[in-house]
Image (spheres, rainbow, N blue to C red):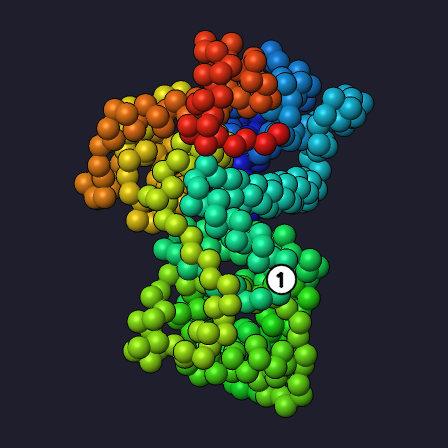
Amino acid sequence: MNSQFKILVVDDEIEYQEVYKMILEDEGYIVDTVSSGKKALEKLDREYFNLVLADLIMEGMNGIDLLKEIKKKDGEIEVIIVTGYGSIESAVEAIKQGAFSYFIKDHDPEELILEIKKVRDIFKLKFENKTLKEENKEKSYLIETNSLKFKEVLEVAAKAAKSDSSIFITGESGVGKEIIARYIHNLSLREGKFVPVNCQALSENLLESELFGHEKGSFTGAIEKRIGRFEEANGGTLFLDEIGEMPISIQIKLLRALDTKIIERIGSNRPIEVDLRFITATNKDMQEAIKKGDFRQDLYFRINTIPIKIPPLRERREDLPMFIDFFLNKYEKETKKRILKVEDEVMNFLLSYDYPGNIRELRNIIERLIVLSDDGVIRKKYLPEYQKNSCYRSLTLKEYRELVERDYIEKTLLKFDLDKDLASDFLGISKRQLYNKISEYDINLVK
């Protein structure tokens, strides 16, 4: 965490700058120094810092004035004021103005290190909470759709959520199978946890222990008892992703657990009853896997009570403008960059590319384009060659116009809180024409 935490030291005495820099870099922090409040503000315009360590008494702009300017610029940047014995009253005033704390010069540097650790821990907690909120926001946003195909998927998922039947989700890699599984869990009446397991990511022995748990000493390395994912998901939902990669030996044990709703930890004969919703997913051709003997047919019938097939992104192009906007906004915030323009050729590519990696690939492309952007412009030269030349077709003028028109109408309706009178006036068309467009593009926005 220290290696990602940036501190700006502001002091008009070079010796103090060097001492603070040496002490804090030894702690693993990224440290930069400037000699005045004015230079500090200029640097903060160009770079982001988590913490500013500012001397109270400096020529020109003093520490408290600098503090006020920093808080105007970005209230999340923390400031620690450095002061001498004779200026403690001013340091207390700085705290009233929003400083995190103060440090008295010539005191034990360990006191300063402890204060900085407090700031770092607060930023870490904020970052984790923000990340969790963004992940939840993204997952809920990716359920939004203008595609009739995907709307049908959501309808089946919503109906299936009200039962305890096993659900089998199929679709290409990156289409959002876990997102649909979470959606089903959230709509269900189950109060327990949603517990995901990727069957492809674990070896046979690890996967068995992950699912069923083990007793202490049951095998080499089992130094303590472990509760498996079946027990963890009791009362909730167990989601097994990439179940087509599960070894046959575990398939047998899984089938028995599903039929009896009883499991046994490795190294124990004690039966444990479990009550959970079971959802599985794969991007594999299961009929082919069964023919080859890689997957048990009886287990396939057991997990496939309610099949749900998610269409690839290339079959729901109606959602591309919405997803592109979402990921542009997401990575603008994350990279602290402001995008002023996307070159026409880039936008044409984003709207017409076939996305073999689906939503995951779209997200990664946009993140990369924003990271590499210069002067607020996303340029074609930053598209990888394999993407420029693969699965790409030019949109017809009609297709491009329809995509842009639909997106603009949706944004206008949202801008005016779905007030169609105001939206039609803003668009320069009659209310009847607006209704026709809404019907033509199957626009279905909800407040």
Note whether residue 82 is visible.
no
Q: Position of residue 335 (x, y in %)?
A: 46, 33
Tell me the residue at 19%/40% (across/down): 389
The residue identified by callout 1 is: 163
**Observer able to see residue 430:** yes
Front position in the image: 364 or 27: 364
For residue 322, above or below residue 275: above
Residue that appears at 52% across and 48% down: 154
Q: Amino acid at mark 1?
A: Ser
Residue 19, image x and y in percent?
Answer: 56, 36
Q: How many marks?
A: 1
Nearer the observer, 62 or 190: 190
| Residue 32 horizontal/vertical position (percent) | 50, 31
Q: Position of residue 60 (x, y in %)?
A: 60, 11
Q: Decide if residue 335 is on the left or right side of residue 379.
A: right
Q: Secondary structure at mark 1?
A: loop
